[in-house]
Image (cartoon, grey):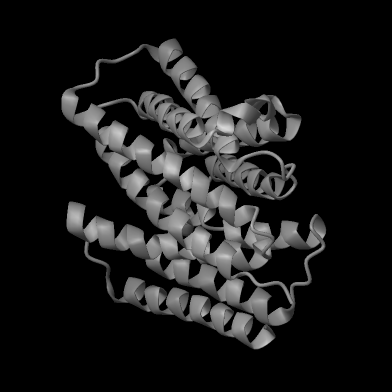
Amino acid sequence: MIDNTRGIVAMLASVVVFIFNDALIKLAAETVPSVQAIGVRGLFATLWCALAVLATGAWRKMAYAVHPKVLLRGGLEAGAAIIYLIALFQIPFAIATAVNLSTPLILTVLAVLLLKEDVRWRRWTAVGVGFVGVLLVIQPRPGDINGWTWVALTGTFLGAFRDIIARHLPPAVPTLVVSFTTAITVAIVGCAWALAEGWQPIDARALGYIVASSLLLAIGYQFLVIALRSGGEISVMGSFRYSSILWALAIGYVVWGEVPNSLALAGIAVIVGSGLYILHRERVSR
């Protein structure tokens, strides 16, 4: 039986880091165009990754930065982020979030089809129940679903394939090199798009949010790649992405004063229960 513990811990760490990164970039996007904020954040994330590469000696293997699979993963990351962002401008936030948090379901399907993982009914049920919990928290309205929802779903699928590609990266490629390539690809795409739309000045406060966000993004890249390369089952690790909604609610309450209603609280209980059940099954299986 595969021990998924290391992958689960790294995935949970990446979720925490990414959700705080999202909160900071949302604050920055209040005064800076979203695409420009993402591009500048990518530039600083590239800087942090480059410093880590130099400090750890991983620069000796920088040739792997242009390895086809590493470049493919970086391209999928940039494509997923930009496509999802386009859709986010056109549909309600709740609908876009619900689509994005379908990732664990998509990853479970891809893990079965592409990685030949043995996913049995208990895990399918737990993942499905977790998604129901997400819908209870977000409470999307069916009337808001339109063609842009499928665009958001396309970005989510690209993100899921990005995670699958990480499993097939050559073992000799340092995780920091993968993070560096991902960051610089997002930076190039985001900044190029922002320049095409017309670059806007960035005030000191927004720049501070972006710099802090970029540091968390670089750390998040590391945790995510570590999780996906841990050798654990992606169908198990992916389900713990649902925990991001719990952190999002907490940040929304502290920063923006958003108070979840009773239905959302019920959804939280469902998500937590789903995660605890998966952990329980993991212990029983071992």
**Residue at 54%, 33% in the rendered image:** 57
Give residue 163's position: percent from left, percent from top. Answer: 64, 48
**Residue at 29%, 42% in the rendered image:** 24
From what the image shows, is residue 76 above or below residue 136? above
The part of the image, by quadrant, that contains residue 179 is top right
**Is 80 left, or right, of 190 in this rendering?**
right
Total marks in image: 0
From what the image shows, is residue 11 above or below residue 277? above
**Is 195 left, or right, of 130 in this rendering?**
left
Q: Nearer the viewer, residue 195 or 18?
A: 18
**Residue at 42%, 60% in the rendered image:** 244
Give residue 9's position: percent from left, percent from top. Answer: 50, 65
The part of the image, by quadrant, that contains residue 127 is bottom right
Q: Quadrant of the N terminus?
A: bottom right
Give residue 273's position: percent from left, percent from top. Answer: 47, 81
Q: Quadrant of the C terminus?
A: bottom right
